[in-house]
């Protein structure tokens, strides 16, 4: 018989029998370090803690020796006599440090671990298909908890977790017991440390990651940096130490210069940086081409910005005026019968005795006279009616000149040169009108 202590009515029996523990262990890889509280070595001895019940947990509080990632957990699983069948248990959970003996927030959980008797069972994946790797970032000196939760209650020869024979270290082992909650295993009479361990890959310690755009992301592992297509600067390296190389791009200088420079160097030189990856060999700094202007004309070899500023429509870099057909503007087409149509100049010219007043004119009749306002003052100087020029046509012009605040219609009537205002330039038009009087 093995000595045992009963902890409450529902906690189960936690003192186990001395058993020879013979097990095989998967070797750690590269810079991986096994973090453990127990002192059991391969072939060593320990106590099988067979007093657990389903839904109870055994947990260890561990300290990371480095910046890295928890990549595996290990649980020494042993029966009194050996040869127990495999069992599917509830879960293995990694917690943040809390206030002992209660763990903090959950970091990761492995559901339904399959346990094999007589082995240091190691788990590196979160799924049964071994496709989702266990990976929990930790920093040097960080305390974390690995908890094993039972689904099955160990039978007389059932396998269970194991403790070493070197005594129970304070603040290192806890149990989540039914009816009690989280409590120090030492306080429950467990005489050793649980053989529950973590494997930390210290080679994956975080550091600076230089991205292709020249920026730096701190505290990234090599794997995380690679996922961002960056260049890992090494474990523990800060962004201040990294001095990430800056990408080059086309730097344009007026009127037509181009040099491949970094953004900072381009700004220093007074150029216009075109972005990372651009190259002067293939980039056109100041594109120019045909520009269709509002009056229907085409301005050749015009910069896009200048074309837009002039109210035009840019036709594309390198496009020639001979290759485009600019849309012609409409204007007031004054007909001989006193009516008005908005037409382009060529269409207006097809109508006998019609007069096209230009792209800035329209057929609006704001004074409600029955004749379009723009057609009431045609280029021939007939300001009274479109029937011919006579002496009566001078009166509207005189009224406009003598009025302290001419109305828009008066200005239009006296605007012989069509610039929208009355000025000395209108004199030539007035003389021509007078000479045309019979």
Image (tube, helix red, strand yellow):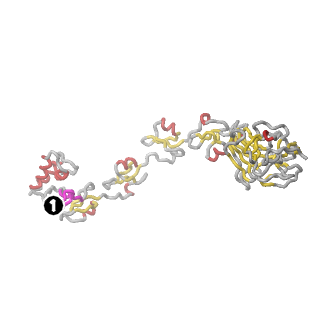
Asked whether, in this view, residue 67 is left or right of residue 312, the answer is right
Q: Position of residue 91 (x, y in %)?
A: 74, 51
Q: Is residue 373 magenta?
A: yes
Q: Position of residue 184 (x, y in %)?
A: 76, 40
Query: Looking at the rendering, which quadrant does residue 99 occupy?
Result: top right
* Location of the C terminus (image quadrant): bottom left
Q: Position of residue 325 (x, y in %)?
A: 36, 59
- Which residue: 19% across, 57% down? 367
Near-viewer residue (87 or 373) = 87
Asked whether, in this view, residue 161 is left or right of residue 400, the answer is right
Q: Tell me the residue that label 1 is attached to.
A: 386
Q: Is residue 128 magenta?
A: no
Asked whether, in this view, residue 23 is left or right of residue 208, the answer is right
- Which residue: 28% across, 60% down? 344
Asked whether, in this view, residue 412 is left or right of residue 359, the answer is left
Q: Which residues are magenta?
A: 363-376
């Amino acid at each position: 018989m093995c000595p045992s202590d009963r902890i409450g009515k529902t906690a189960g029996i936690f003192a186990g029998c001395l058993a020879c523990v013979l097990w095989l262990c998967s070797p750690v890889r590269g810079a991986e370090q096994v973090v453990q509280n127990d002192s059991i070595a391969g072939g060593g001895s320990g106590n099988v803690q067979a007093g657990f019940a389903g839904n109870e947990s055994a947990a260890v509080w561990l300290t990371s020796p480095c910046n890295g990632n928890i990549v595996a957990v290990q649980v020494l699983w042993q029966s009194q006599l050996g040869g127990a069948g495999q069992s599917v248990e509830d879960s293995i959970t990694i917690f943040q440090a809390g206030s002992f003996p209660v763990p903090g927030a959950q970091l990761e959980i492995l559901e339904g671990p399959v346990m094999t008797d007589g082995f240091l069972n190691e788990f590196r994946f979160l799924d049964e298909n071994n496709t989702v790797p266990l990976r929990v970032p930790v920093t040097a000196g960080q305390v974390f908890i690995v908890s094993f939760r039972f689904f099955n209650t160990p039978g007389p020869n059932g396998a269970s977790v194991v403790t070493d024979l070197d005594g129970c270290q304070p603040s290192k082992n806890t149990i989540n017991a039914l009816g009690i909650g989280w409590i120090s295993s030492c306080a429950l009479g467990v005489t050793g440390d649980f053989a529950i361990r973590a494997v930390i890959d210290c080679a994956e310690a975080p550091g600076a990651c230089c991205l292709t755009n020249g920026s730096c992301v701190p505290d990234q592992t090599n794997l995380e940096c690679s996922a961002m297509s960056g260049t890992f600067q090494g474990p523990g390296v800060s962004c201040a130490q990294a001095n990430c190389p800056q990408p080059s791009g086309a730097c344009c200088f007026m009127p037509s210069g181009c040099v491949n420079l970094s953004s900072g160097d381009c700004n220093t030189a007074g150029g216009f940086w075109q972005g990372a990856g651009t190259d002067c060999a293939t980039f056109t700094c100041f594109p120019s081409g045909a520009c269709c202007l509002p009056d229907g004309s085409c301005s050749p070899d015009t910069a896009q910005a200048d074309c837009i500023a002039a109210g035009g429509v840019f036709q594309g870099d390198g496009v020639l005026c001979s290759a485009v057909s600019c849309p012609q503007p409409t204007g007031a087409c004054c007909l001989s019968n006193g009516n008005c149509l908005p037409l382009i100049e060529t269409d207006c010219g097809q109508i006998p005795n019609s007069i096209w007043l230009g792209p800035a004119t329209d057929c609006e009749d704001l004074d409600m006279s029955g004749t379009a306002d723009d057609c009431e003052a045609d280029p021939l100087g007939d300001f009274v009616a479109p029937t011919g020029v006579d002496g009566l046509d001078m009166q509207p012009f005189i009224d406009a000149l003598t009025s302290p605040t001419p109305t828009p219609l008066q200005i239009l009537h006296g605007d012989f040169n069509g610039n929208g205002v009355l000025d000395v330039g209108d004199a030539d038009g007035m003389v021509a009108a007078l000479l045309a009087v019979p």
